[in-house]
Image: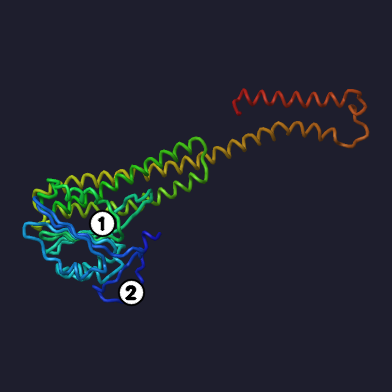
Amino acid sequence: MSRVTKQYTKKAGMPPGALVHIGKDFSEGTTIEIFDYNEKEYKEYNFTEKALEQFEKLPPPDKDKIRWINVDGLRMVEVIDRVCKPYNIHPLTAEDILNTGHRPKLEDNGEYIFFIMKMIYFEQSELVDEQLSILLGNGYIISFGERKGDVFDQIREGIRKNSIRIRKNGADFLAYSLLDAIVDGYFIVLESVGEQIDVVEDAFIDNPSKEGLQKIQILKRELLYMHKSIWPLREVVSGMQRTENEIIKNSTQIYIRDIYDHVIQAIDTTETYREFLAGLMDIYLSSVSNKLNEVMKVLTIISTIFIPLTFIVGVYGMNFKYMPEIDWKWGYFGVLAILAFIAVMMILYFKRKKWF
């Protein structure tokens, strides 16, 4: 539930626009990564929270260059404030950046477009989820992540190695590239989830167990969170398609439409997996019920076989003085033979009926 509920009590009673970090406090500090590039050249800068003055002294890029500022770590509120001020970012926007419990959304503020989404990826075989906030302005992009680590390594390499698509196009294409990398990360996670579902399904067919049931519950919780993160992204991408802001050029719209298709596909996949897991739950319950029925059937058959035997033994267990068979020399062995005959005949009858 820590992914769903955040520390909203920190913000209680404060005025709108108050900058308070709401979310998990990661141990690492805040880092600022900057790329200034155009089709011919690029420059890369890296700053820590202790080098804010050097960051603020950095000259603006040339008019023909795009600047990408990537901030990792939201714990230092002052850093976020000082990064936003030169670009006249509204205090309410900065407040949303620091509130990591936001639903994915898009806001067009005229001078810049602000959107929030959830980034889900694997880091050393561990599933990581974090909120990513992006400010798309005229000639610049500022991205804010909760912690160090993301899914943008290929984009960085594309800038360094002069990828024609990224270096030739504007900031809006870079925003598309970031969004596309996030959506591609969803499919990597969903592929892993699908493989885990296959393993659980095979185990359930052979031997349903409580461990498998716990694994299903974990997978259902992960898929529920992914569905909650991906579903609103339709509105974000759709808003980028409908916006009349000139920051997003017509040449980029075709790529954004492609992302919309991928988002719909990811949503369909999560829903399919959730239905499949619900089916596995039914399989588990049915298997447990069938096992119980098998046990009860065996016990019932055994009880049924022993009912007539118990009746005969009960009759001859009565302590009447005058019973004809009491003095018979072969009476004991005769009764045993009758008991065995009855048991065998009942077993043959049950097998003929295919009751076991």
Q: Which residue is mark 2?
A: 12
**Three-letter code, disc 2:** Ala
Occupied quadrant, residue 312: top right
Residue 181 or residue 208, whichever sits in front: 181
Q: How many marks?
A: 2
Left or right: 240 as drawn, with respect to 302: left
Quarter placement of the C terminus: top right
Residue 234 or residue 32, whichever sits in front: 32
Instruction: Label 1, secondary structure: give it.
Output: strand
* 16 up-or-down from 298: above or below: below
Instruction: Label 2, secondary structure: give it.
Output: loop
* 238 up-or-down from 69: above or below: above
Residue 74 x, y percent position in the rendering: 29, 65
Left or right: 62 as drawn, with respect to 15: left
* 73 up-or-down from 15: above or below: above
User: 10 Å neighbourhood of mark 1: few (<14), some, or many (≥20)?
Assistant: many
Left or right: 118 as drawn, with respect to 279: left
**Marks 2, 1: nearer the viewer:** 1
Quarter placement of the N terminus: bottom left
> What colour scheme governs how the chains and residues are painted in the rendered image of this protein?
rainbow
Residue 102 x, y percent position in the rendering: 28, 62
The residue depicted at 12 percent of the width and 45 percent of the height is 164
Mark pair 2, 1: CA separation: 24 Å
The answer to which of marks 2 and 1 sits earlier in the sequence is: 2
Residue 120 x, y percent position in the rendering: 31, 52
**Three-letter code, disc 1:** Met
Q: Which residue is mark 1?
A: 117
